Amino acid sequence: MKPHPDSLQRFLFEQSPVRGELVHLDDAWRAVLERHDYPPSLRAVMGELMAAAVLLAATLKLKGSLILQIQGMGPVTLLVVECDGELNVRATAKWQGELEGVGFAQMVGDGRFVITLDPKEGGQTYQGIVALDGRSVAEVLQNYMLRSDQLQTRLWLAADEQCAAGLLLQKMPGEGGYAIAGHDEEPDDDMWQRVTMLTDTLRDEELLGQPSVELIRRLYGEEDVRLFDTQHVAFRCTCSRDKVARMLRMLGPDEVQSVLAEQGVAEVTCEFCNHQYRFDKVDAEQVFASSVALGGSASVH
């Protein structure tokens, strides 16, 4: 029995301040791999970051987007994953040279980790930037959460050519208020240590291959766990011809005309979905003759 494809399963431990999420990405993950020929070692890191982005976006209940970036100083110069509040996700990466046998730390070097919360619709954007501290995607994110005074968080991540998956546990703040109405039990203060130790026994092949409910029951069979409805996750790119047109306006008519004179057509390719947009001389004239006010992103993305 395969995991429920492209789904997020939320759960919590009764009488305790601990909650969890488990995500499986199948079609969404393969949609990323189909658009670019990423080296195997880079694919593994991308899949882990993609699973982590979905897990974190789900905890934040965003109306906009969560963007995770690893800006590397090694052969991998950029890793970007974006996930919105509806759990639509996309990812891309830039690298140079051979990556065979290169581990995470060597791959990214002394880079930095950037997390951006973009509320869209005119809200204020939040961005945190820290040094890359960790030997894996999970360690980098856990150290960031710890240092930014966020909730105590643990992540278990894995990816192969078919699936990317992740499990998140968070300890909520406070000492009381966790008992269910109508019950008199005291909160279980030892739950966090107990369930993190149980989850440390998790193997990558189990995380990738077992259905969410089955895996939760296997790990926490002695605990009182409440399951919530699953949420669907999907690959979706937000690029559009209109966004490319806005980018061309930002470049200005002289720059665009220079490209047209040299190449006959201006081509812009989305780095996320690999879709190509072509603007010839007539298209360019329409772009700059348009009365549409300049706004939105100055990027095809």
Image: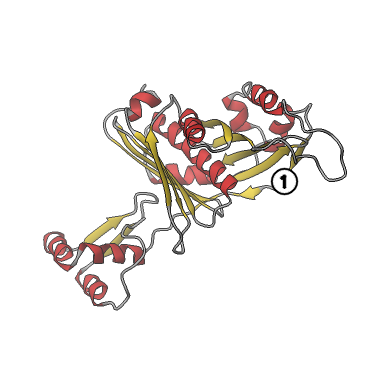
Task: Give residue 24's quadrant in the image.
Answer: top right
| Along the viewing direction, whichever of 202 and 32 lies nearer the viewer | 202
| Along the viewing direction, whichever of 209 and 135 lies nearer the viewer | 135
Report whether 168 appears left or right of 270: right
Q: Position of residue 69 (x, y in %)?
A: 39, 41
Q: Is residue 224 above or below residue 274?
A: above
Residue at the limit of the structure toward the front, as seen here: 175
> What residue is at 48 percent from the left and 53 percent from the top?
65
> What residue is at 39 percent from the left and 58 percent from the top?
239
Residue where numbered disc 1 is placed: 228
Q: How many marks?
A: 1
Asked if one can make out residue 26 in the rendered structure from this viewpoint, the answer is no
Q: Position of residue 60 (x, y in %)?
A: 57, 48
- Local packing at callout 1 (Cα closer than 10 Å; few below 14, some 14-19, many 20+) is few
Report whether 60 appears left or right of 250: right
Secondary element under disc 1, as helix, strand or loop, is loop
Q: Amino acid at mark 1?
A: Phe
Report whether 226 appears left or right of 73: right
Quarter of the figure with the N terminus: top right
Q: Is residue 278 above or below residue 125?
A: below
Q: Position of residue 172 (x, y in %)?
A: 65, 38
Task: Give residue 287's quadrant in the image.
Answer: bottom left
Task: Give residue 201's quadrant in the image.
Answer: top right
Report whether 129 appears left or right of 22: left
